[in-house]
Image (cartoon, helix red, strand yellow):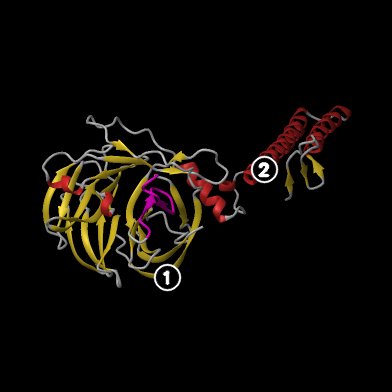
Amino acid sequence: MPVRNRKPDGSKAVVGNTTVDTLSEQNSSTLERTKRQMTERPVGDTRRKRILTHSLRMAIGGTIAVIIVVVASALIKRSARDPSQNPRASNDEQSAAAFLNDTSAPTPSSLPQHEQPTLSPSPSTPPRVSKIGHFELLETVPHDPTAFTQGLFIWNNNTLYEGTGNYGESKLRIVDVSSGNVVKEVSLESNLFGEGISHYTTKDGTRIVQLTYKEQTGLIWDMDLNLIDTFKYETITSEGWGITYADSHGLLVSDGSEWIMVWDPESLTNKSVVRDVRRFQVQLLYKGSKNPRAMARVNEMEWDTHSKTLLANVWVQDVLVRIDVESGFVTQIYDMQELWPDRPSSVDVFNGVAITNEPNVVWVTGKWWPKMYKVRLIDG
């Protein structure tokens, strides 16, 4: 049924060829006509009550229909204005609108009581607009559907390291990326909820660092999954989310806030609480916006050694973002909605990204997802 809302010039809403006001007038006429009929011919009380009840029902039903038409018309008009509510809007508009609506920065808990770290200076040039990118699917391999994926990275081109979460189920494992088979794994203590993982370089060799969700405890492993040490750390929200080793920048850490913290890798083994030596705010500037806004909920992260930028998941969003660590600005938002659009409610969010030796080609998956995907990221 075609429905059009009232126009700006004040003309009436239309259903077919009938105006809303005409429908209301018809309902009123029906009730008045029935009343006249009842007074013009003698009928019994019971019959009169039945006629009156029937007329009232018809009038009320007609009025409800008019209300439904008006509400539907208003919703259609809203849909046309709001890209995130309009199924005919372009994918770019829908993705960007949903992303902007859902990633406002939450109010963080009180900052840790220690000397404030150095903040990144404001960029000297105006921020670039965050562009909407896409992806090309290259390959699909099986993935353990019981893995609540929290972090990934590729080692020596074909060995995947994966950290998983949930109390009593958290693991660190080695996976054959070509088949998805688990080669080796170790379990975390049941009181630890595993989070992001990253390799990093120390004077003693390559190590793996693994965060925990609320325990403020980090774990240090060797590449064969032997536990070497643990340490305590502080973040803005007192949580650990994602971590990645960014060469000379150090270890980059996310905690659900709009801030990315920078750790000195050597501080992980000095037996004191690890704190950030620097932090920068992640900001987003969408086309048409005048001012950048803080972007929170950065989750799993991966340092892209090819472009020297930060790739990151955003919690509960089917996107990857590319962040310039010098300014904190998001330069690309890769729309990943079509990767697995009709997934069941039994799986959790899109999470996990690992770079490969080929520029712009990464492995991605999600929490409890049965597949892992090799994709090429295409800039907008």
Image: magenta residue range: 307-327
> Can I make out residue 147 in this image?
no
Left or right of 34? Residue 192 is left
Residue under the image location 31 percent in, 61 percent down:
145
Dot 2 amino acid type: Lys
Tell me the residue that label 1 is attached to: 138
Extreme front residue here? 124
Percent across and percent down for residue 9 are 80, 36
Write down the residue under mark 2.
Answer: 77
Closer-to-camera residue (14/60): 14
Above or below, 183 against 202 in this view is below
Residue 29 appears left or right of 176 = right
Q: Secondary structure at mark 2?
A: helix
Q: Amino acid at mark 1?
A: Leu
377 lies above or below 94:
below
Quarter holding residue 357:
bottom left
x 26%, y 38%: residue: 235
